Amino acid sequence: MTIWMIIRNSLRHHALSTGVTAVSIGLGCGLLMSVWVVNFQTQRAFKNVTGGFDSILGPRGSQLQLVLNSLFHMDSSPGLVKAFDYRLFREKYKRFYNRAVPIAVGDNLKGYRIVGTTLELFEVEHSPGQKYELAAGEKFIQNETQWNKEAVIGHTVAVQLGLGINDTFQPYHGLNFTEGQIPHKDIYSVTGILKPSGTPADRVIWIPIEGLQQMDGHDPRFAGDVSAVLIQMSDNTTARAFGMNSLDSIYNKGTDHLTFVKSNEDVVARLFAQFAWAESVLRWVAYLVAVVAAAGVLASIYNTMNERRREFAILRALGARRSTIFSVIVLESATIAALGVLIGFGVYAIILLAAEGTLRNEIGVSLHPMEPHKVMLIVPVVMVAFGALVGIIPAAKAYGTDVAKNLTPQI
Amino acid sequence: MPLLKIQQLIKRYTAPGGEAHTVLDVPEFTLDAGQQVALRGSSGTGKTTFLNCIAGILRADQGDIELAGQNIAVASEGQRDQLRAQHIGYIFQTFNLLQGYTCLENVLLGMSFYGQANIQAAAAILKRVGLSDRMDYRPSELSVGQQQRVAVARALANRPQLVLADEPTGNLDPQNSWEALQLIREVCKENQAALLLVSHDQAVLDQFEDSLDLAELNQAAREVAK
């Protein structure tokens, strides 16, 4: 109790320097945790955004562009897969896959992509054990004989555009919305709204693929073409590996007009690998901030040592041991670091919530700010230990205080 | 057996030039439990050094200082800290109150390095010295006389066997001086604590039955005087 009384008193007495130091530690600590967790969760979220599909077949071009366009609903479309190629794939390589779901893009509603597809998309588990579920309404009508101008919209689309069941809209041509643009004549009605999935699908308006292919104003010559084919490979491990390798050889080496993405996850991993330097720079900046903050603790406490010599001498005269004085300073330093860590959690929460909001709104990927991660234990513990460690220097000075000499007020 | 027994106590200081000066040379001094003794100590007689040696703040170069059966002169620093916390209350001329702490906290700190700090006991001793309504005040918010009373309360809070008082009335006006002295003596008596007080004020010394001249007790001071 005594030690804490002395520490509390000192912190209160030096409230400004304590506050500034704690805030700087908080920034370092919060940055470190955020960089780590955002990087970890973003990578995980992006790698998980496969929509339940292993591979993609698309027009010849960049595999990354194909993945971004087909799964993340970002970037421009690399082109079209001709109807002939699509049918050939479906029929000839049926043994390699469980599902092959076509998608077609090219229109938007106020910037939100309209993606034509088949109802089979909703039967796939986009994440382990999770399918796209309806929060309200029902799926669009689409079968061998009929399709309707109906749409199932993602949660974000419904919230941001204020669309509800039975509301109608006219699609705009292109992937990006331009103010003043004249819409297609086709009128679609919303039949279903999806529950939030924490995936880019939350930002998508799904319509029957025929609707997009035959949209007013689209060239009828390309009506059977698709933008990409999302492929769920066979469950059989051998068939799966064989299929992936075979399709890789057939399309990537044997043709010049189609691209086969063997593993969506690998493409995303390669994307992150390209930005590893940025993450590394951020991490080193955070390390630097943390070290500077710890040095701040040292400077903050060390600078008070002269004015506190009399206090230590009085405490020693009252019977405090040298080790008690030493402990007070080390614990005081650790306490400032601990206060900084508390602020750090606040900084972490702000950064994570901001990152979460941005990623959710821009890409549809969800982060989980409250999800525990080992770094949220390691960084605080290391920071407090570091605080205690730098406290040893002023503590050693306090330890050596000459009692008799410092009991007399210095004039 | 006396509470405090000093024999052949010698304390030297090394001057900046490296020359050693003996400032304290006390062949013998005793103080019984509950006894109250005043030492006349004018400037240069080594009064603060003498009290600091007894308190274990300074280590004697030679001799024995036995307090409650333990020889402070040969004790380690840690043992001296513990003896001081357990057996000694120290009242300083400048009070040496901790400015950032309230009266109650100052007293609690006086109790806390031996045993447990007890808020009720601290409050009781503050009440005894007439500061029950000033417990949450900081020293700077008190008059000089009130600060002295806090110092007295802190020195006695742990019920020490020996109270050392170094010019305790040196900073007080005559009225406060008289009141402070009465308080110190009364509270020491109530707590059955021995009191060793040094002062150069004759009015203070006159109030003690046992009064000695430190200049006579300290042979080193006598040498300087010659």
Image: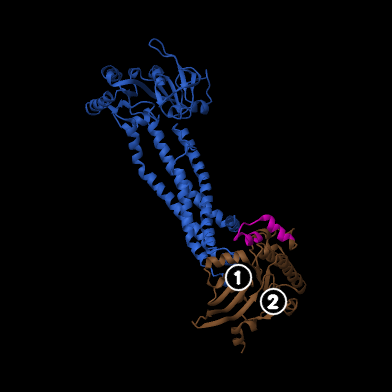
Percent coordinates x, y for residue A41 in the rendering: 42, 37
Quarter of the rendering containing residue B59: bottom right
Query: Marks 1 and 2: same chain?
Result: yes
Which color has been applied to chain B in this rendered view?
brown
Residue A255 disc label: none
Looking at the rendered structure, the kind of residue marked 1 is Leu
Percent coordinates x, y for residue B81 in the rendering: 56, 66
> Which residue in the structure is indicated by mark 1?
B67
Q: Nearer the viewer, mark 1 or mark 2?
A: 1
Quarter of the rendering containing residue B58: bottom right
Sequence-earlier tag: 1 or 2? 2
Looking at the rendered structure, the kind of residue marked 2 is Ala
Q: Residue furthest right?
A: B175
Q: Locate the C terminus of chain B and report the quarter of the image it occupies.
A: bottom right
Q: How many marks?
A: 2
Q: Locate the N terminus of chain B and report the quarter of the image it occupies.
A: bottom right
> Which residue in the structure is indicated by mark 2?
B38
| Image mark 2: chain | B
**CA gap, disc 1 and disc 2:** 18 Å
> Could you tell me if residue A314 is visible in this image?
no
Residue at image x 51%, y 67%? Answer: A400
Residue B190 vertical position relative to residue B207 in the rendered view, above or below: above
Magenta highlight range: B106-127
Residue B179 vertical position relative to residue A163 in the rendered view, above or below: below
- Crowd around label 2: few <14 · some 14–19 · many ≥20 (10 Å): many
Residue at image x 39%, y 44%? Answer: A279
Which color has been applied to chain A in this rendered view?
blue
